Every structure is written in structure tokens, then in C-alpha cells.
Image: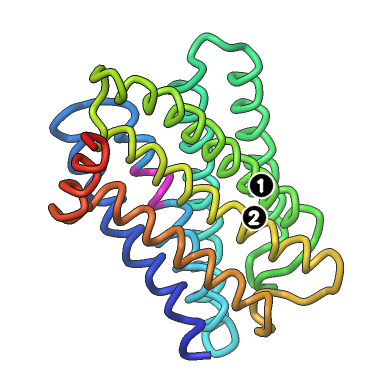
Amino acid sequence: MSLVWVGFLAFFFVSLAVGVRLLLLFRRTRQLPELLIGIGVLGIGPVGFGLSMAGALTLEGRPGLGALLLGTASLAASVGVVAKLTFNWRVYHPEAAPARAATVLGALVLAVCFAVKLRQGFGSGLHVDLVYYLRVFVQIGALLWGACEALRYHAMMRRRVRIGLADPVVANRFLLWGIGAGAAGVGSLVGTVAQLATGVSLQDGGWVTASSSLHGLVAAVALWLAFLPPRAFREYVKARAAA
């Protein structure tokens, strides 16, 4: 199990660093994309995921604190997903009515799910029910939608890079962002489908946990190279584009 935690911890710390950096960048630029990605990464990653794990571990010994952590995690993850949906809409399709409708619908579903769970109470822990699956599938949809849009945008920018009209590092960032969001979405999808089909949860260990950890590791590496790239990696991207 120690190796399995590598992926989870890598995703936690990289998401934390990237999210904080983007919010600090927003303070300087006042640009909406930095704000939305920062909130999305922090809400879904270190705050939502991290507090949910802490709440599940704390619930038995200190039920009050555990319920508070789980409730905060659920709220943070919902806010993060709404930010991710809004980013997909405002950045890629700002004038498209279907994108706006999908964002509003997703936000409404998450709000209803949180209200229902708040009424039930978070003291029951990570209870798997219809509300849980609705929230998870909205999150998966937001991640996979964002991944497809980023990869599509990368394909367009790659053509511009060839004729010198785009920065290869920026183009590569869209590729890495697509890979990172896609890995997180696919990992969540695999775990959720496994729960539906077999009743095996993430906390039960086994191949479901290993799969989630592996996808988390891929997402962490992609996010790190996209938003915190070493100078050697940036030079490599530029040299490859020039060649």
C-alpha cells in the first residue's frame, strides 16, 4: 500500500502548488482563466480530495470533526467542479448556448446534491448513494470535457507553431493540461464504474485503489510540467519545435 500512496500524495502536493500559484498569478493579472483553474485545481484536488480522506480517517474517533471535514470537502469539490465547468464554457465556447447550459445544469445538480447531503448529515461518512454518483459523474464530465477541449486547442495551436504564429511552450501547456485533466477524469471514471459493477470502493484497496493512484500520478506529472516546468523541459519543448 505504501507505493499506492505515491500517486495520491503526488497529486495532492502538485495540485496544491499549482492552485496556489495560479491564484497568486490572478492577483497580478486579474484574468478569469487563472482564477477559474486555480479554484478548480484546489477545490477538486488538495481541499476536496485531501479533506475527504482526512474526514474518513477521523470520523470514527472524532465524529464531529470528521463530519465537518467531509462537509467542507464536499463543498470545496463542488465549487472546484463549477469553476472547471465555467472555465470550459468561458474560455473555449464563450458564445455557445449549449456550453452555458451544461455549466448551469452541472452547477444546479451539484447544489441540489450538497443540499440533500447537508440535510442528511455528513456523519454517515462516504456513503455511496444516488447523490454521491450524481456528484461524481458531474465532476467526471467536467474533467473529460476540459481534457477534450484542451487537446483540441493544442491541435490547432500546433499548426500555428509550425508557421511561427504560436509559442511552442504555450501549445505544449494545453497538451499537458489535457493529459492531466483526462487522467484525473479517467481515474475517477474507472473507480466509479468499478463501484457500480462490483461494489468495490476506493477505500477497500486492491486494483481500484492502484488504478486511482496511477491516474493521480499521471495527472500530477502533467500538471507539474504544465504549470511548474523546469527550465530544461521548456528548452526541450522549444528545441523540438524548432527542429
Q: Which mark is residue 152?
A: none
Crowd around label 2: few <14 · some 14–19 · many ≥20 (10 Å): some
Residue 180 position (above or below residue 64): above
Identified at 72% across, 50% down, the residue is 116
141 vs 57, nearest the viewer: 141
Say which element carries label 2.
helix
Q: Which residue is mark 1?
A: 115
Identified at 39% across, 22% down, the residue is 159
Q: Does the CB distance between marks 2 and 1 fall below 8 Å?
A: yes
154 vs 201, nearest the viewer: 154
Query: Does the segment drawn in magenta span residue 88?
Result: no
Write down the quadrant of residue 177 in the picture.
top left
Residue 175 position (above or below residue 121): above
Q: Position of residue 209 (x, y in %)?
A: 62, 77
Write down the quadrant of residue 194 in the picture.
bottom right
Q: Amino acid at mark 2?
A: Leu
Q: Specify whether 173 is left or right of 59.
A: left
Q: Position of residue 242 (x, y in %)?
A: 21, 34
Q: Which residue is mark 2?
A: 118
Q: Which residues are magenta?
A: 38-42
